[in-house]
Amino acid sequence: MSSQIGIKLNSMNSNFDYLNSFSDISKDTFETLNKLASFRRIKAKTIITRTGEIPTKYYFLVSGLMRAYLNSETGKLYTKNIFSPVSFVASFTALINRRPAELTYETLTDCKVYELDYTDMMNLCKENLSVSLLYSKILEQVFVGYEKRNMELLTLDATQHYLQLRKRIPNIDDLIPQYQIASYLNITPVQLSRIRKKMN
């Protein structure tokens, strides 16, 4: 039992440190946020937000991989992003504007997340300046991440893009199927196989 408590405390401390990397928050503020969040274990291949749905939740991913993808009218699937720990996952544009999501969000592996209700978070931001500042910093980092992703798409070829992905998630090839990685790189599985052969 004591080892389980130790694991939980270590996890909470690492989450606290991560949030503090955005903005200085007190232990009391962290506890307030912790009470607002619901810890969930989500199985692989679970859709948490569908295209066309108006989302109400966002997620603090602490274990596992998630993705955001678009299913085109022709049936082709485009993976816009692969999320790895520790990160915030949500259709923020849809949440902020209260409109249907343009992408589908799905777990690629078994995941551990903290689920937060967007409306509850906004109400807390109105009451707590520290939380409001933290939320603003998180949105800034989300924007920076999207801009970085767009720059990579413009400036990197498929091999460089694949190397960047492996740098961020070293064991990515063992975690998800080749076709999902290829979709993220916007190439075919055959092209990805050729890249791997060249690298080897």
Image (cartoon, rainbow, N blue to C red):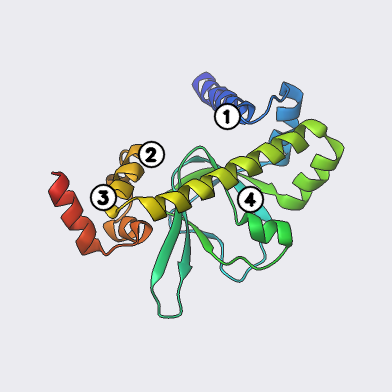
Front: mark 1 or 2: 2
Judge left or right: residue 91 versus residue 75.
right
- Discs 2, 4 touching: Cβ within 8 Å: no
Front: mark 3 or 4: 3
Vertical position of residue 74 compared to residue 78: above or below: below
Horizontal and vertical percent position of residue 177? 30, 56
How far apart, in angstroms, are the residues tagged by discs 1 and 4?
Answer: 17 Å
Front: mark 2 or 4: 2
How far apart, in angstroms, are the residues tagged by discs 3 and 1?
Answer: 31 Å
**Nearer the N terminus, badge 1 or badge 2?**
1
List the residue tagged with mark 2: 168
List the residue tagged with mark 3: 159
Q: Residue 58 carries which label?
A: 4
Front: mark 3 or 2: 3
Horizontal and vertical percent position of residue 34? 69, 34
Callout 1, which amino acid?
A: Tyr
Callout 3, which amino acid?
A: Thr
**Nearer the N terminus, badge 3 or badge 4?**
4
The crowding category of the residue bearing disc 1, from other C-alpha atoms within 10 Å (few below 14, some 14 to 19, many at least 20), is: few
Q: Which of 183 and 145 is in front in this view?
A: 145
Q: Which of 144 and 76 is in front in this view?
A: 144
- Discs 1, 4 touching: Cβ within 8 Å: no
List the residue tagged with mark 1: 18
